Amino acid sequence: MNSESIIEIIKAFEEFTKAENKYDIHSFALWIVNQKSKKEMEISTDDTTELDRRINYLLGRYNRYSKYYVRKSLQDLPIKTVDEFWILNYVYIQANPSKSETYDATITELSLGTKIVKRLISLNLINEFDDQIDKRTKRLSITEYGKQIRNEVFKRLGEDSVYKLAIIDKEHKLNLLTTLEKLEEYHNDLYKNTK
């Protein structure tokens, strides 16, 4: 490494400490990577289509990482997927929702939702019963065992969430949350109006 490279690193560290008000090497390294990524994105994203593709690609990868971490967290429990948890949790929160309400609220396709509900019933996590007014409608309720499992999964996923977002500071988390809430609102409306 020559003296010019060292001077460049020192200047970058000064810029980092002014911008972030941090002094640790780990945060500095992440900042350097982010600065490099920003410069690369500026060069390669003159049109927003490429930027949109890159964001969607990274969101898709993050979703896959999340599924992997969830599977690891649930290894010794009867619930094996995040989709199973979403349905169990919705039944817990809503207290006796219909099957179709459950599928809509959890954005689950009918065939997959039916499969998951059958599995949760066979595991004694939920029950299915006829609606009192409309006998064609099936309703779901959570069992005591289902509540225990739901609470354990909730605890583990909470711990898992901290791990998945550990690298991001609070300010970036708040910015990310604002952006994701905006996307959720848009896509929730779109989903409701196009299904």
Image: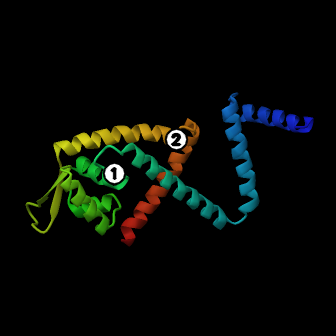
Give percent across and percent down for residue 5. 87, 38
Could you tell me which residue is drawn at 33 percent across and 66 percent down?
A: 109
Give percent across and percent down for residue 161. 45, 41
- Callout 2 environment at 10 Å: few (<14), some (14 to 19), or many (20+)? few
Could you tell me which residue is drawn at 30 percent across and 39 percent down?
A: 152
Q: Is residue 20 visible?
A: no
Question: For the N terminus, which image quadrant?
Answer: top right
**Near-viewer residue (161 or 115):** 115
Question: For the C terminus, which image quadrant?
Answer: bottom left
> Can you tell which of label 2 and label 1 is closer to the viewer?
1
- Callout 1 environment at 10 Å: few (<14), some (14 to 19), or many (20+)? some
Q: In the orientation shown, which residue stands out farthest toward the right?
A: 3
Kindly state the secondary structure of the residue where label 2 is placed: loop
How are the residues colored?
rainbow
Could you tell me the amino acid type at mark 1? Lys
Could you tell me which residue is drawn at 79 percent across and 32 percent down?
A: 14
Q: Marks 1 and 2: in contact by CB < 8 Å?
A: no
- On the image, which quarter does residue 140 sit in? bottom left
Could you tell me the amino acid type at mark 2? Leu
Establish if 14 lies above or below 100: above
**Near-viewer residue (84 or 8):** 84
- The CA span between labels 2 and 1 is 22 Å
Q: Is residue 113 left or right of residue 168?
A: left
Mark found first going from the N terminus, 2 or 1: 1
Q: Which residue is mark 2?
A: 165
Establish if 40 lies above or below 22: below
Kindly state the secondary structure of the residue where label 1 is placed: loop
Q: Is residue 29 visible?
A: yes
Q: Is residue 109 left or right of residue 26?
A: left
Could you tell me which residue is drawn at 37 percent across and 52 percent down?
A: 82
Q: Which residue is mark 1?
A: 80
